[in-house]
Image: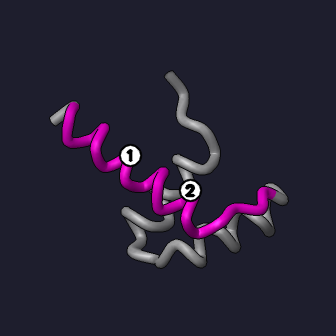
Amino acid sequence: MEKDLITQALQTIHLQNGKDLKEVSQYLNMKYRIDTDILLLEDRLKKLIQEEKAVA
């Protein structure tokens, strides 16, 4: 299953590059015009981390 834009941005910008969630939100807003809330990104990040732990 292909990952959505928010998940891809979280993986590349936050997890791989070590940037904060505010920069992820700014990237999504500028590139794709997706207005995201920091709380939404935090929830998505928690789910992403739980899924990775479940797979590993």
Q: Rate crowding at label 1 as few (under 14), some (14 to 19) or many (20 or more) other CA atoms within 10 Å.
A: some
Above or below, 38 against 6 in this view is below
In the foreground, 48 or 31: 48
The total of numbered circles placed on residues is 2
Q: Is residue 23 above or below residue 35?
A: below
User: Which residues, given as a range, are shown in magenta?
Assistant: 34-54
The structure residue drawn at horizontal position 58% and vertical position 69%, both measured from the top left corner, is: 38
CA separation in Å, label 2 and label 1: 12 Å
Residue for badge 1: 48
**Which is more N-terminal, label 1 or label 2?**
2
Q: Looking at the image, which residue sits at the far right?
A: 33
Quadrant assignment, res 54: top left
Where residue 48 appears, as percent x and y from the top left, is: 38, 46
Measured as percent of width and height from the top left, residue 56 is found at 15, 36
Given the image, on which type of amino acid does mark 2 rest? Answer: Ala
Residue 45, position in %: x, y? 42, 55
* Residue at position x 60%, y 38% in the image: 4
Structural crowding at the residue carrying mark 2, measured as other residues with C-alpha within 10 Å and reported as few (<14), some (14–19) or many (≥20): many
Q: Is residue 46 left or right of residue 22?
A: left
Residue 24: where, in percent of width, then height? Answer: 59, 68
For residue 36: magenta? yes
Closer to the observer: label 2 or label 1? 1
Report the residue at 52% width, 72% height from top: 21
Give residue 9's mark: 2
User: What kind of residue is marked 1?
Assistant: Leu
Q: Is residue 7 left or right of residue 54?
A: right
